[in-house]
Image (spheres, coloured by chain):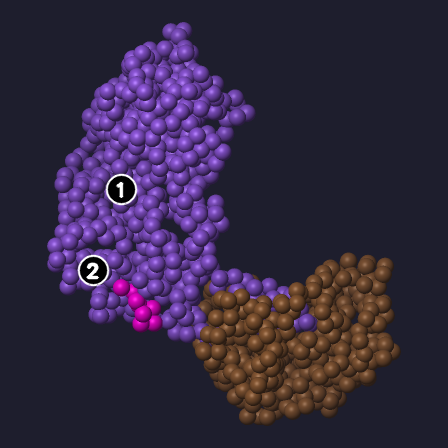
Chain colours: A purple, B brown
Amino acid sequence: MPQPDHIRNFSIIAHIDHGKTTLSDRILEITGALTAREMTEQVLDDNPIEKERGITIKARSVNLGYKAENGETYLLNLIDTPGHVDFTYEVSRSLAACEGAVLVVDATQGVEAQTLANAYLAIHNDLTIVPCINKVDLPSAVPEMAREQIEEVIGIPARHAVLTSAKVGTGVKELLEQIVHDIPAPTGDPAAPLKALLFDSWFDMYRGVTCLVRVKDGTVKPGTKFRLMGSGLVAEVQEVGIFNPHQVVVPQLSVGEVGYVISGIKELGATKIGDTMTEADRPCAEALPGFQDVKPMVFASIFPTETDAYEDLRDAMEKLRLNDASFTFEPESSTALGFGFRCGYLGLLHLEIVQERLEREFNLSLITTAPSVPYRVRTTRGEELEISNPVKLPDPQLIDEIREPYILATIITKDEFLGGLLALAEERRGTQVSLEYAGTQRAVLKYELPLNEVILDFYDKLKSISRGYASFDYQLIDYRPGDLVKLDVLINGDPLDALAFIVHRAKAASKGRSLVEKMKEMIPQQMFEVIIQAAIGSKILARSTVKALRKNVLAKCYGGDITRKRKLLEKQKEGKKRMKKVGRVDLPQEAFLAVLKVD
Amino acid sequence: MTGSGVYVHVPFCARRCSYCSFVTAVGRQGEEAYFDALELEAEARLGELPLPIDTAYFGGGTPSYVDPARLGRLILLVRGAGARLVEVTAEGNPDDLDVTTLDGLSAAGVNRLSLGIQSLEDAELALLDRRHDSAGALVALRRAAPRFERISADLMIGIPGQTRESLRRSVEGILESGAGHVSAYLLEIEKAPGLLALREESPGLFADDEEVAERWEEVNEALESAGLARYELSNWARPGQESRHNLKYWEGEPVLGLGLAAHSFDGETRRANTASMEEYLRRVGERGRAEATRSRLPAEEAIRERALLGLRVASGISEEEYDRACSTAGADERERLGRCEEAALLERREGRIRLTRRGVLLSNEVFSLLV
């Protein structure tokens, strides 16, 4: 049984692409957790979409044995964290299970927005930070610049920051030594009643729910009758174990240890992340602080392209939610698109990942509508409504006030791009909070921005203005009144509910014009003319027309070769099937997201 | 129309046209061996075809490019199998049609000549990589007229640089030459790399869909007022000059296809020969046949295919046949077919349903719902 003073629990935090996953892999390799044969790139990312996109979505933990230079063997629990702003809440819950964090900074890029955001999360959780400057093998690496920025932008000492190249393996051993040396050992009372933080859980078809816990006090072992203090759920432990990274059964988990608990629970809903696990018969005095509920801030509807796939879609969503509690959905019915679901996401990346998983893992063809943020509406009758679907916005004359969510955005950039980024933030109705220079040529820009100006394409614009250099992170601050209107899109004179979106009044006309032009490019010619209009109420702001198709006929069908002709016709038939039929009009999937593609 | 037909593929060409996507070989090398094999295949397979056999068709490639006597020997074989041929067509390239070749084809038993004129404008012909020029085309048409019962001319719409006027001149020239049958096709450039490159370079030479549709309407108008009725999607003829052979494809009559990549249909099963010359020669030498694929549609699909092909013919199909085909289609397709009628692509009249003029140009909108 590992002694608490020989345990180190830590996470690795970094801005996206600064090398966190590669560093994790290297640590696994050096500690011998995996044989060379087992070593494949990005071991911790076991979801194919994570691998393809090079990002980490779900946190995982690995127990590693490490023989330090002082001759002692330590148990290192590496708790992986996601690196994207959409999943900040997953970072904070991983951090709550640790005493320390390795802060990775790319020596060629320096401190970026998520470096800052994640570092603050760690500081907020009272963690000891071990700075690590990575990618020092690259010719463009400037470790001194990174060191200076860690001190000036984040405000933590970086004199002893370890220089590593996770790719080639240099410095990783030194980093492990520093982890053992600097990060405090966990403390706790092994004799006290069980007190463990539930910081991740997932569903398995055969085993039911697996909970990932960090024991603070006491022990947990098979037969322990436990209670989750928040949800009140009581169950008996069937099995405890660790990941090294293979799943290994152990007799018990005690103070400072991180591992899994299986108890035959069938519903993921009862195991809320952040809950405290204690003994049912001998509860601890008070629960751990837990986490705030994450609220989805981006909403979009999903409809099956083929109406009869609704049940399949619901099944798929339910399965997906078993492993992604932050994804919410409720049934929705659209006059144009039939039955579907209104879904809530943490952000746009989350939306894309969910849609991709639904299409890929469940083989569904889907229409996703343009994303929206939740609005708070006070009606003239004094009701307070939360509107996450533009379709549900009351008539203008019934609205007293609409408030929209605002964020505090942090943008870190080279100063040469500052002009363009300031113009972008202003154009997006932003208010500058601060502009500070840190180190040479590096600016930290803070803006308050309406979230609805950010969710669609702000990030892409930011990246293109700064040629990829600027980084961005945000946190929600409050709701503020705005002069907002619902922009309707009409197809052949009929409003298409799923295309409506909420926009600031001053931008409605130009947005409407670009939108109808963009949709005209996206909608293929068909048998009938298609008229696309943008309108506020009965006032038409813009119009475009897709002319009726004049010609779709094959050349010579020759020498009785009907088979070749059939193949071409079948291709056309399949093309139509992939589109959504709205009245007499066939709309391709991308037309529903046209608003994402306009300025 | 009742009767079977024989199709013979002649893959040899003097050169390949820029828009061509058929199985062809450049030059006459191997002609003897190929025709020897064709005769073996004919002897082995003609018995499969139900009598009466009333048409034969030599397509290509360029049948006029080879020795007419070899066509004659095949015609004799077909007759020997009990055929009473009323229509024997050979496709021809104007450039090959000197008096000797024309006399040879006529002597061989060909009574209908289908000429790949395409255009009577030199610049347009050059872009298509045709061997002949306008003068050559007119000479060929003039020489052919007295030697064959019927002459058909191919016409291409949508050639780069083609204008309303140039197209009108081509149509008039063809009509004046005495051709009683015209096949007019819309040029497809998607599979012609040369033409695609040209479009990159000079997009102005290419008409848009709207203009091509107008040109087609103008051609239709000109041909009909000259007394050639449109009897199929792309074919116009004076009364009695329709291609009996090609109608068999649309009406589901049996056709035996001989030669490289030739297709056969016996009323139920479609067969295709191999497209590899080497394999064709070897397999026919061994056992008289060189079938590469065979497919038979499930009953419901066959019903829809019959309707799809029948709708190519101007007189259309019976409402009963059409409705039966619709009843086998999926709900989505049925609804879309309803929309095709709403959009006046299809019209019902006197118990029959047919494509309208607009429907002809949008025929794939209908056909793709029936596959």
Q: Nearer the viewer, residue A133 or A236?
A: A236
Task: Name the kind of residue labelled 1 in the image.
Answer: Lys
Percent across and percent down for residue A181 are 31, 13
Question: Looking at the figure, which quarter contains the C terminus of chain B?
Answer: bottom right
Q: Check the image and report above or below for A40 versus B15.
A: above
Q: Residue at x 31, y 11 (%)?
A: A191
Percent across and percent down for residue B73 are 85, 76
Kindly tell me whether residue A543 is visible in this rendering.
yes
Q: Which residue, given by chain and number where applicable, does mark 2 sit on?
A: A394
Circle 1 crowding by C-alpha within 10 Å: few under 14, some 14–19, many from 20: few
Q: Check the image and report above or below for A159 versus B141.
A: above
Dot 1 and dot 2 within a common chain = yes
Q: Residue at x 71, y 80 (%)?
A: B245
Q: Which residue is drawn at 21% across and 30% down?
A: A153
From which residue to which does the magenta span run? A488-495
Q: Which of B242 and A482 is in front in this view?
A: A482
Kindly tell me whether residue B62 is visible in this rendering.
no
Classify residue A306 as left or right of residue A81.
right
Q: Which residue in the rendered view is the most extreme toward the front? A: A281
Q: Which residue, given by chain and number where applicable, does mark 1 sit on?
A: A295
Task: Name the kind of residue labelled 2 in the image.
Answer: Pro
Percent across and percent down for residue A26 are 43, 24
For marks 1 and 2 on the same chain, the one whose residue lies earlier in the sequence: 1
Q: Does the magenta stretch include residue B38?
A: no
Chain label for disc 2: A
Tag shown at residue A412: none
Q: Which of A596 and A245 is in front in this view?
A: A245
